[in-house]
Image: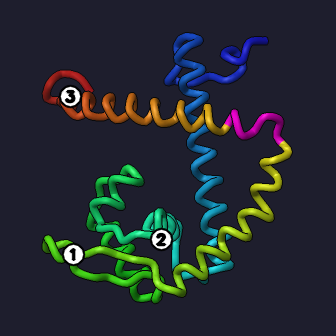
Amino acid sequence: MKSRYYRSWHLARNEFEFKTTEFEWAMIRFHEAFARFVTTTGTVTMGGDIKYAEQLILHVIRMQDRPKNSATIARLINRDDIPNIQYSLRKLESAGLVTKSRDEKSKQFNYAVTELGTRVTDEYHEIKGEILIERLKQIQNIEGRLEDLAQLLSILTGVYEESSRDSATFTPMSEADGEA
């Protein structure tokens, strides 16, 4: 039996829409599993007060071992909610994981990982290696598959971003317009 007959999606009226919706559903589940992994692994190294968003931001700040400002961090993780990122940065600073310094050329602040931040991100890396990377290595041709998926997801990110911009130009219908 074809999968479209045993799983009814209101978002899928043909085979292509079905496959697209199934992909989106898989992405939702993957994102939640990834967030759970980051959170539980980070809790081992950083404690319970540092949540998923802060952990991601800490690792992004550590990328390339150079300070970053909130706008750069937002761009790197494809977020546009700068106030929430700044809140997370304050939490990381309070926890002693990052330091804040004013950029000499502007009014912005840059954030760098502290010695403690380096220690916990290194420990996170060790745990990730032991419990995730070893499992991934068991999948046939995983390196090539991950590379292909990363490229595909980058392309799809652009497609979804452009579609999001397009949808922002639509005007919601109201009951007064005669449609709901």
Magenta range is 139-145
3 and 1 marks in contact (CB < 8 Å): no
Q: Nearer the viewer, mark 2 or mark 3?
A: 2
2 and 1 marks in contact (CB < 8 Å): no
Residue 112 image point, x, y percent: 39, 77
Q: Is residue 28 magenta?
A: no
Disc 3 secondary structure class? loop
Q: Considering the image in quadrants, where does the N terminus appear?
A: top right
Is 57 situated left or right of 110 in this image?
A: right
The amino acid on which the numbered mark 3 sits, given as a three-letter code, is: Phe
Residue 103 image point, x, y percent: 21, 75
Is 127 situated left or right of 92 in this image?
A: right
Q: Which residue is mark 1?
A: 103
Mark 1 is surrounded, within 10 Å at the Cα level, by few (under 14), some (14 to 19) or many (20 or more) other residues, namely some
Query: In which quadrant of the rendered view does residue 8 lie?
Result: top right
The mark nearer the N terminus, 2 or 3, is: 2
Q: Residue at x 61, y 31 (%)?
A: 148
Q: Is residue 142 magenta?
A: yes
| Structural distance between the alpha carbons of marks 3 and 1 | 40 Å
Q: Which residue is mark 2?
A: 58
Q: Which mark is residue 170?
A: 3
The amino acid on which the numbered mark 2 sits, given as a three-letter code, is: Leu
Q: Residue at x 42, y 81 (%)?
A: 98
The amino acid on which the numbered mark 1 sits, given as a three-letter code, is: Asp
Would you say residue 53 is visible in this rendering? Answer: no
Q: Which mark is residue 174?
A: none
Q: Residue at x 65, y 53 (%)?
A: 33
